[in-house]
């Protein structure tokens, strides 16, 4: 098979795979989640297997332990979070009334200080912002109320995901061997090297960044609760989860917590404490957690991760978010490999003077 046919073959395969993922995106969540669990637990399973334990027994024990930890975390965290969410929904009308009163006072003070034309523009802008906020809140409430599909997805995730994780983890080595046997023989060693590079970067990012998110979520939740913020646990968890996207978690958490603090506290010192918690969290993340847990050799730039997560979420929803980082790792390794091949090819060196001539100059 010549180069042109190979390019056509792999291009068609890639297009068919992307179309299939898009068409089946509604049912992929438990399978993608199960694959992620199997990928994260495979190194532990391999180590236990080297100690002489059965692969099936090891897989069953690890899957059960993972599920028990997940269920225990849900049972401990969900009641507290649910209580704060209910309280936040109940307090939402009062928050909007306080916000409306603050905006009215701002307009009254601005009317005496600015020109009538500027005042009219300011009033229109604030009214438009209020309408957009109300529309967004209505849309969010509608999405939560029409959560029948989300409930079905949650049930399928809880039921199907452990089964998928068990079988993939049990047969992981055989699946890898089968895939290796399907590689083009002439390029098999190159593809293996690229796969090892993807695995190294992806494993480092997922395990490191996941640990960072967990630590930051606990730090923000405890810090905001100790600061007296009424919904500090919910805001801290949201900020911790969103910390998987670089800088987004801290920004969203800071805006939410300071906004709630402005409505709850009268003292500026307490509002400053809430803001300082997120500043301290960013300092800890940037100077300690990320360098130690993620490292500088992962090769996934924060901007590239952010773009991949937004693109994946736009195209495939939550499944796309889960697939975004692996896809970004594969594309990043492929691009670096392509650049290395290009720089070693005549396309890069054509017409350039030899190295000795360059040194003479």
Image (cartoon, helix red, strand yellow):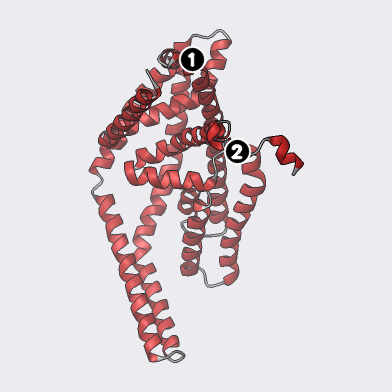
In what element is the residue under mark 1?
Answer: helix
Spatial CA span between label 2 and label 1: 28 Å
Q: Position of residue 224 (x, y in %)?
A: 54, 56
Specify the quadrant of the image occupied by residue 48: top right
| Residue in the foreground of this view, choosing between 202 and 66 | 202
Residue 352 appears in the figure: yes
Q: Residue at x 46, y 38 (%)?
A: 328
| For discs 2 and 1, the disc positioned in front in the rendered view | 2
Query: Residues at badges 2 and 1 in contact (C-beta under 8 Å)?
Result: no
Specify the quadrant of the image occupied by residue 20: top left
For label 1, the crowd category at 10 Å Cα-Cα, with few meaning under 14, some 14 to 19 and many 20 or more, is some
Q: Which quadrant, please, contains the C terminus?
A: top right
In what element is the residue under mark 2?
Answer: helix
Q: Residue at x 51, y 20 (%)?
A: 192
For label 2, the crowd category at 10 Å Cα-Cα, with few meaning under 14, some 14 to 19 and many 20 or more, is many
Q: Earlier in the sequence, mark 2 or mark 1?
A: 1
Residue carrying label 1: 58
Q: Position of residue 207 (x, y in %)?
A: 54, 33
Give the label on residue 294, or none. 2
Q: Is residue 212 left or right of residue 71?
A: right
Q: Residue at x 28, y 50 (%)?
A: 144
Q: Position of residue 269 (x, y in %)?
A: 60, 69
């Amino acid at each position: 098979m010549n180069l042109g046919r190979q390019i056509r073959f792999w291009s068609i395969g890639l297009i068919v795979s992307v179309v299939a993922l898009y068409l089946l995106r509604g049912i992929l969540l438990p399978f993608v989640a199960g694959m992620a669990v199997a990928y994260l637990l495979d190194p532990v399973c391999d180590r236990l297997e080297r100690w002489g334990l059965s692969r099936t027994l090891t897989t069953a024990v690890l899957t059960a332990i993972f599920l028990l930890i997940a269920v225990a975390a849900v049972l401990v965290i969900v009641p507290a979070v649910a209580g704060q969410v209910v309280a936040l929904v109940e307090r939402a009308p009062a928050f909007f009334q306080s916000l409306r009163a603050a905006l009215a006072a701002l307009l009254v003070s601005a009317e005496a200080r600015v020109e009538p034309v500027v005042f009219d523009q300011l009033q229109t802008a604030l009214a438009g912002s209020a309408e957009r906020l109300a529309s967004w809140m209505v849309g969010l409430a509608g999405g939560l109320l029409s959560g029948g599909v989300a409930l079905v997805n949650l049930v399928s995730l809880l039921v199907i995901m452990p089964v998928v994780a068990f079988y993939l983890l049990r047969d992981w080595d055989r699946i890898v061997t089968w895939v290796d046997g399907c590689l083009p023989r002439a390029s098999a060693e190159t593809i293996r090297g690229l796969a090892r590079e993807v695995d190294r970067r992806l494993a480092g990012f997922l395990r490191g960044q996941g640990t960072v998110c967990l630590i930051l979520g606990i730090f923000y939740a405890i810090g905001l609760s100790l600061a007296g913020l009424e919904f500090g646990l919910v805001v801290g968890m949201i900020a911790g989860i969103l910390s998987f996207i670089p800088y987004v978690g801290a920004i969203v958490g800071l805006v939410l917590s300071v906004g709630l603090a402005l409505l709850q506290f009268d003292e500026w010192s307490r509002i400053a404490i809430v803001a300082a918690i997120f500043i301290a969290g960013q300092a800890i993340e940037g100077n300690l957690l990320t360098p130690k847990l993620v490292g500088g050799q992962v090769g996934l730039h924060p901007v590239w991760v952010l773009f991949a997560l937004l693109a994946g979420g736009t195209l495939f929803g939550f499944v796309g978010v889960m697939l975004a980082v692996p896809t970004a790792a594969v594309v990043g390794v492929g691009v670096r490999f392509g650049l290395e091949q290009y720089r070693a090819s005549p396309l890069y060196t054509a017409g350039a003077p030899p190295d000795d001539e360059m040194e003479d100059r």
